[in-house]
Image: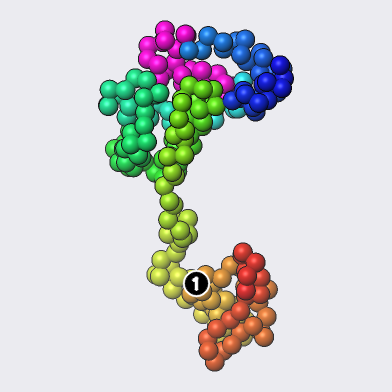
Amino acid sequence: TEEGYVCENPLRDFSYEAHKKWVEANRSLKERVEAEETKNEGYLKEFLAYAKYKGLCKATIHKYKVGCEHLFQYLESLGLEDIRKTSKEILKGYLNYLGQSKNREGEALSLNTQICHLISIKKFYKYLEKYGILEKVLSNILEYPKCPRGLSTAGMSHQEVMKLLNLIADKDEKAIRDRALIELLYSSGVRANELSKLKFANVDIKSGMLKVDVPKGGKD
């Protein structure tokens, strides 16, 4: 019944009618998985079919596949062909394995790639948990690596900044203003739109301080 579905069914993100169609097409999931080359591959195949049914794009489904297969490489090195036998300790070991993994060029995986793999694997585990394949919740063990804060690029070098300042050779008021603006951008990290709205009253020349009224984040 629909009431029973709402109360008991782990795939609650389906509508009731959509769920009935899904169950009809996948009622022998566990039996079909047993016939696959490995149980892991069987569960992954069903997970990707589920993702396709949910309307996810091909690029996202491919990322899910790549991420899960990276996990399988680690599990195979431990002799595990059934993901149901994974534990908290094994997943913590995978996090270390992921951090030490390299790409085809022999370079360490970028943080973005590591996070993409973990997103895919977490989705996979949540699917297995919701569908009743896993008896225990393990998806919360997979924590994303922390990204270092700071600028996304290295920015300009000191020599490049000096070269830019030296382009302002004039000594008139406009040139002095332009040089002051460039020096302020370089030394303070203030944003261009914040600097363009800067008021003279917010500049304390004696202390060498200035106040930005509405910086990013909404705090002075």
Q: Is residue 49 inside the magenta stretch?
A: yes
Residue occupied by mark 1: 186
Dot 1 alpha-carbon crowd within 10 angstroms: few under 14, some 14 to 19, many 20 or more: some
Magenta span covers which residues?
31-52
Residue 64 vertical placement versus 201 (above, below): above
- The amino acid type of the residue labelled 1 equals Tyr
Left or right: 197 as drawn, with respect to 128:
right
6 or 176: nearer the viewer: 6
212 or 180: nearer the viewer: 212
Q: Residue at x 49, y 72 (%)?
A: 186
Residue 127 vertical placement versus 22 (above, below): below
Q: Residue at x 55, y 27 (%)?
A: 130
Judged by its main secondary structure, the magenta piece is: helix
Q: Position of residue 16 (x, y in %)?
A: 71, 20
The C terminus appears in which quarter of the rendering? bottom right
Q: How is the image coloured?
A: rainbow
Q: Position of residue 44 (x, y in %)?
A: 46, 21
75 or 57: nearer the viewer: 75
Left or right: 21 as drawn, with respect to 80:
right
36 or 160: nearer the viewer: 36
Left or right: 133 as drawn, with respect to 71:
right
